[in-house]
């Protein structure tokens, strides 16, 4: 009988070793440990044995039972653990919450404003419907002057127009406040241009103004260099090129080195290696006169950049109309 | 403007290569945008800013080039005529002396009009002018070379042999050299003969006195006109010519005499004939423009130390005259061709430009007087900054709700504003619109929202959630106002591209949920939701939000008449919030409330009520009855159908009880719950389930 049990133990363990699935293990359990198991069959013969023999066989049988149960347990745990992972197909997409997107123009405005607020500027906005004085006269843009050509304007009624630039806000703030002034002005502007890939009758600008004692052209250069390199990357070169604006003197156009072609020449920079991104200059004495600032005491610089232009360069967008079509496939990219 | 590199060499002994010169010009404010090799010449395309009419000719550019390259500058112009010796043969009457401060006419007789020689035709064509004949070409040659617009008349076609400079009479017409007939009026200055206009002063000549191959005698006009007058005339007639372009910006009148005679001599040389007479009618007193330039001011504005010598060299090479020099300043006279330089700051710009912006240092400044006191004085500005912070919060809040920001045009069509219920005296029209699609300043953001939805729906993108933050423009009680609004809209389904949840059509409550969340986020509490009858919402599906007795938002399902204007036939749920009205109440500050120390008890309550009873009323009753022990009442199920009689609804609420000072015991909660049930049954005829 002892021999029989030992045989049984051998086959049981070999069968258990072969069992790969939970069902197979269960079969092994039933076969060797169930009520109708072989062991039970063998143990039925116990009644014919002596007390000593009974004790001996009982002990062996119990050891066998314990061993096989333990082994089954281990095997089931291992199998369960192994089964735990293959149950999840990690390649099925996760469940996403609908995420909203900020318009690339707004994003760019925030980016610009954040750079300047970190330099101590305050964000100010002004009305889009503006008085002539703020849009033109106080900015030294006389009526019937070719300088006004660049500022063609939509009129709503007499002395009410859609601002053609954000510069009127400079005047509004200076009229109200005394220096020091450090402001940054984002907003919509309007010019009656026919719409095409690079023109729009509505677009966005960010204007800046710093007025204080002892502000120089060098400060203009330094501040705007910091801005442009934060905006376009440390490696870009910044160039200040003389230009003309009625409200600044001296005036400059702002160029950054073309980061599309690394100044090797491409379509984006018209092979010049430079990208114009805005204008700047020292506030013209006439503007200070219009707001009763003492030009001998204060000086300052002003600048303006086109938001669409910057966003188009930054994101590689080639058509300004995309900003206002609001195609979902466009909006969701930002 | 096109510039010929070779032509510049007529005026200066340039040594720089065309490329190098282009760079130098660009960095001095004459932006050369392209450079093209043409045979043995280089043609620049340059942008000339409106303050520099002196650069609208080869001579002007050459002067600048000579200064930038330290080359010599000279003018090859010469005339072989002694102006003093002639006169008495030409009849000119300048009726408008202010409009025409100088009129110079030269009579050349017995010429032979031919084709111009190769040098002239080549130069003109290279710079984009079509060669015509030896007389006309020479006037153009002087226009491009010396910047002086001139006009040549066929003397024999001038009726009465008399030139009158006068305003046109209303109804007078002129068939101009561009082949178009222009209708003139009394604001337009003309050159007339004894009977009729023969040219629009400073703008374009007439066909009547045109130079042809048969022309024998030429009257050459070289004049100065009022800039504003020419600009207005050109704009009114809708033409811009090389002549009007220059006169608008300012052509110096000082040099008119010399140039006239030089041109006449040139004509004599190229087309034969003899200069018979030159008459100069001048009403001009040229004022010398002199100003003081302080070295300290250069330093104050530019932030650089530049030597006195360098300053003088720059100014002199640009044609300025140093009248006087003292220790710390210069007395400088502006040359007649630089009318743009009138002030000390203008001189400083000239120095900066030639010295080179790139050579100036870059510094960064702190706002010097940034003490607290001064920031106080910026209070207005600080308020504005907060406004911007609110806008940002709005962007973030709606974005977090899963909406995508759109930016639409501020102008809409008449039809659109009408469908949203705006009357014509409430809206603001553009005086001159680009198209009927954009003729009215939007009085609502819902129109732009619909445009964006329509754009996407037409492209098979149907499941959309968008918002726009922007200004609207209306006449409120006949007063123009610009206000900040926000609008958002939903259509299609949610839970799309989601294998776990079934897609669900968005509805009124999805919209309302966003609105509630949004207002809560902005700190706008205690609002009332009321029905709203605005006809742009579908009947029974419109609502408004009142706050402090003001309507601050309207929302609902847009009416079929509205969406059909945009060719949309899907259900659109949209809201508009009048942000301007709540800006003052919006709150960026949050205050911390201590977290409850004692556990909460939650009990459910299911009731059956008539379906027209407002849920708001039930919740109010529950809260009033339970007083401060009720922390939250949540509606978690609405059911109608089987087991519920028609006209009734089953509502299930979850009520959260909590005390601030103790742990509530069951008996206490049971007691309140029973009281609530009783109140609901007695007051609202509810049936407890």
Image (cartoon, coloured by chain):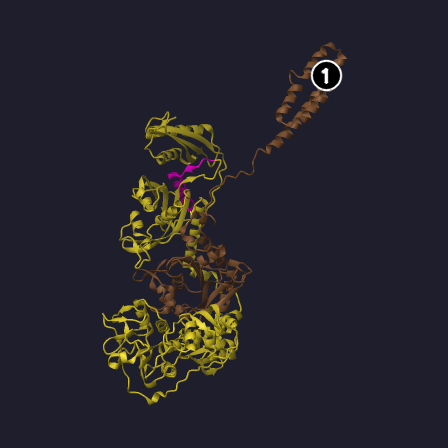
Chain colours: A brown, B yellow
Return the x and y of residue A169 as percentages of the image width and height: 39, 61
Q: Is residue A41 above or below residue A85?
A: above
- Residue beneath the point at 38% across and 66% down: A139
The quadrant the N terminus of chain B occupies is bottom left
Which region of the structure is painted magenta?
Answer: B501-523
Task: Assign the C terminus of chain B to one quadrant of the image.
Answer: top left
Asked if residue B264 is positioned above or below residue B369 in the image, the reply reads below
B56 to A274, vertically: above or below = below
Subunit ID for the residue under disc 1: A
Taking the magenta stretch, the answer to whether it contains residue B511 is yes
Q: Is residue B10 magenta?
A: no
Q: Main secondary structure of the magenta part?
A: helix
| Rendering quarter of residue B259 | bottom left
**Whole-percent x and y of residue B616?**
36, 36
**Horizontal relation, residue A254 to residue B677: left or right:** right
**B59 on left or right of A232:** left
Residue B113 drawn at (x, y percent): 35, 79
**Whole-percent x and y of residue B310?**
51, 78
Give SS at disc 1. helix
Of residues B590 and B35, the one nearer the viewer is: B35
User: Of all residues shown, which one is farthest toward the top?
Assistant: A48
Instruction: Count up the numbered dots.
Output: 1
Residue B468 visible in the current orientation: yes
Q: Which residue is more in the foreground, B231 or B649? A: B231
Q: Residues within 10 Å of mark 1 (few under 14, many from 20)?
A: some
Image point 39% across, 85% down: which residue?
B79
Between residues B81 and B119, which one lies in front from this camera angle? B119
Q: Which residue does the numbered mark 1 point to in the structure image?
A: A58
User: Residue A305 sits in which quadrant?
Assistant: bottom left
């Amino acid at each position: 009988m002892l021999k029989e049990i030992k045989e049984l133990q051998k086959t049981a363990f070999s069968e258990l070793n072969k069992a790969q699935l939970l069902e197979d293990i269960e079969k092994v359990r039933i076969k060797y440990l169930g009520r109708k198991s072989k062991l039970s069959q063998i143990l039925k013969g116990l009644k014919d044995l002596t007390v000593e023999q009974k004790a001996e066989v009982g002990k062996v049988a119990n050891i066998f039972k314990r061993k096989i149960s333990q082994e089954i347990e281990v095997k089931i745990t291992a199998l369960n653990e192994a089964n735990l992972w293959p149950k999840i197909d990690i390649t099925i997409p996760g469940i996403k919450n609908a995420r909203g997107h900020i318009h690339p123009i707004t994003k760019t405005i925030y980016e610009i404003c954040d750079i300047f607020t970190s330099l101590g500027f305050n964000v100010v906005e002004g009305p889009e419907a503006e008085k002539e004085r703020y849009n033109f006269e106080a900015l030294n843009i006389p009526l019937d002057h070719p300088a006004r050509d660049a500022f063609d304007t939509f009129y709503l009624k007499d002395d009410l127009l859609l601002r053609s630039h954000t510069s009127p806000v400079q005047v509004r703030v200076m009229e109200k406040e005394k220096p020091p002034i450090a402001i940054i002005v984002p907003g919509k502007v309007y010019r009656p241009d026919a719409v095409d890939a690079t023109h729009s009758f509505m677009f966005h600008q960010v204007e800046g103004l710093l007025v204080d004692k002892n502000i120089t052209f060098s400060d203009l250069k330094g501040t705007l260099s910091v801005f442009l390199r934060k905006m376009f990357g440390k490696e870009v070169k910044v160039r200040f090129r003389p230009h003309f604006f009625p409200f600044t003197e001296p005036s400059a156009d702002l160029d950054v080195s073309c980061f599309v072609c690394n100044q090797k020449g491409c379509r984006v920079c018209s092979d010049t290696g430079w990208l114009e991104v805005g204008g700047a200059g020292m506030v013209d004495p006439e503007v200070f006169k219009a707001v009763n600032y003492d030009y001998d005491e204060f000086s300052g610089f002003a600048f303006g950049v086109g938001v669409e232009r910057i966003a188009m360069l930054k994101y590689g967008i080639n058509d300004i109309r995309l900003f206002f079509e609001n195609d979902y496939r466009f909006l969701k990219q930002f | 403007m096109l510039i010929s590199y070779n032509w510049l060499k007529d005026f200066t002994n340039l040594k720089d290569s065309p490329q190098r010169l282009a760079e130098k010009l660009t960095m001095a404010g004459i932006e050369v945008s392209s450079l093209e090799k043409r045979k043995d010449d280089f043609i620049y395309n340059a942008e000339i800013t409106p303050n520099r009419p002196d650069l609208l000719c080869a001579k002007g550019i050459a002067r600048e080039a000579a200064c930038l390259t330290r080359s010599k500058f000279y003018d090859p112009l010469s005339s072989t005529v002694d102006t003093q010796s002639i006169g008495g043969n030409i009849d000119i009457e300048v009726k408008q002396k202010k409009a025409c401060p100088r009129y110079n006419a030269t009579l050349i007789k017995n010429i032979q009009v031919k084709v111009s020689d190769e040098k002239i035709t080549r130069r003109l064509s290279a710079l984009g002018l079509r060669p015509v004949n030896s007389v006309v070409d020479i006037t153009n040659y002087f226009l491009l070379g010396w910047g002086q617009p001139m006009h040549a008349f066929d003397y024999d076609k001038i009726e009465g042999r008399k030139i009158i400079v006068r305003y046109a009479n209303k109804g007078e017409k002129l068939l101009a050299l561009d082949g178009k007939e222009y209708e003139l009026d009394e604001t337009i200055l003309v050159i007339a003969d004894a009977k009729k206009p023969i040219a629009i002063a400073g703008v374009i000549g007439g066909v009547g006195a045109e130079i042809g191959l048969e022309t024998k005698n030429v009257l050459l006009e070289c004049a100065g006109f009022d800039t504003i007058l020419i600009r207005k005339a050109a704009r009114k007639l809708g033409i811009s010519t090389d002549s009007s372009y220059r006169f608008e910006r300012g052509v110096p009148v000082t040099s008119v005499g010399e140039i006239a005679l030089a041109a006449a001599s040139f004509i004599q040389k190229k087309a034969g004939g003899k200069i018979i007479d030159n008459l100069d009618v001048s009403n001009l007193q040229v004022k010398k423009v002199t100003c003081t330039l302080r070295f300290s001011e250069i330093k104050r504005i530019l932030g650089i130390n530049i030597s006195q010598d360098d300053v003088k060299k720059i100014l002199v090479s640009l044609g300025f005259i140093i009248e006087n020099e003292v220790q710390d300043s210069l007395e400088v006279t502006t040359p007649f061709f630089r009318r743009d330089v009138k002030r000390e700051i203008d001189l400083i710009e000239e120095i900066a430009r030639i010295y080179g912006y790139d050579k100036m240092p870059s510094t960064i400044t702190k706002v010097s007087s940034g003490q607290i006191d001064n920031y106080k004085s910026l209070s207005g500005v600080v308020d504005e900054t907060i406004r911007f912070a609110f806008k940002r919060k709005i962007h973030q809040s709606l974005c977090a709700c899963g909406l995508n920001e759109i930016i639409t045009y501020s102008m809409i069509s008449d039809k659109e504003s009408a469908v949203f219920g705006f009357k014509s005296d409430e809206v603001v029209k553009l005086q001159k619109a680009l198209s009927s699609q954009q003729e009215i300043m939007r009085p609502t953001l819902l129109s732009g929202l619909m445009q964006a939805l329509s754009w996407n729906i037409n492209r098979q993108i149907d499941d959309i959630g968008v918002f726009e933050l922007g200004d609207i423009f209306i006449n409120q009680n006949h007063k123009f106002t610009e206000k900040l609004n926000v609008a958002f809209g939903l259509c299609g389904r949610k839970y799309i591209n989601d294998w776990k949840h079934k897609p669900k059509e968005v509805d009124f409550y999805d919209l309302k949920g966003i609105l509630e969340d949004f207002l809560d986020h902005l700190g706008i509490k205690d609002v009332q939701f009321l029905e709203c009858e605005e006809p742009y919402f579908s009947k029974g599906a419109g609502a408004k939000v009142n706050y402090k007795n003001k309507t601050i938002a309207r929302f609902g399902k847009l009416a079929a008449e509205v969406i059909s204007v945009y060719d949309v036939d899907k259900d659109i749920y949209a809201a508009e919030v009048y942000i301007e009205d709540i800006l003052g109440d919006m709150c960026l500050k949050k205050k911390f409330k201590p977290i409850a120390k004692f556990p909460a008890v939650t009990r459910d309550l299911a009731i059956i009520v008539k379906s027209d009873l407002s849920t708001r009323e039930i919740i109010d009753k529950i809260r009033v009855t339970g007083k401060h022990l009720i922390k939250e009442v949540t509606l978690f199920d609405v059911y109608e159908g089987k087991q519920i009689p028609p006209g009734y609804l089953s509502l299930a609420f979850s009520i959260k009880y909590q005390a601030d000072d103790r742990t509530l015991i069951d008996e206490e909660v049971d007691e309140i719950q029973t009281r609530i049930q009783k109140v609901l049954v007695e007051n609202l005829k509810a049936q407890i389930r």
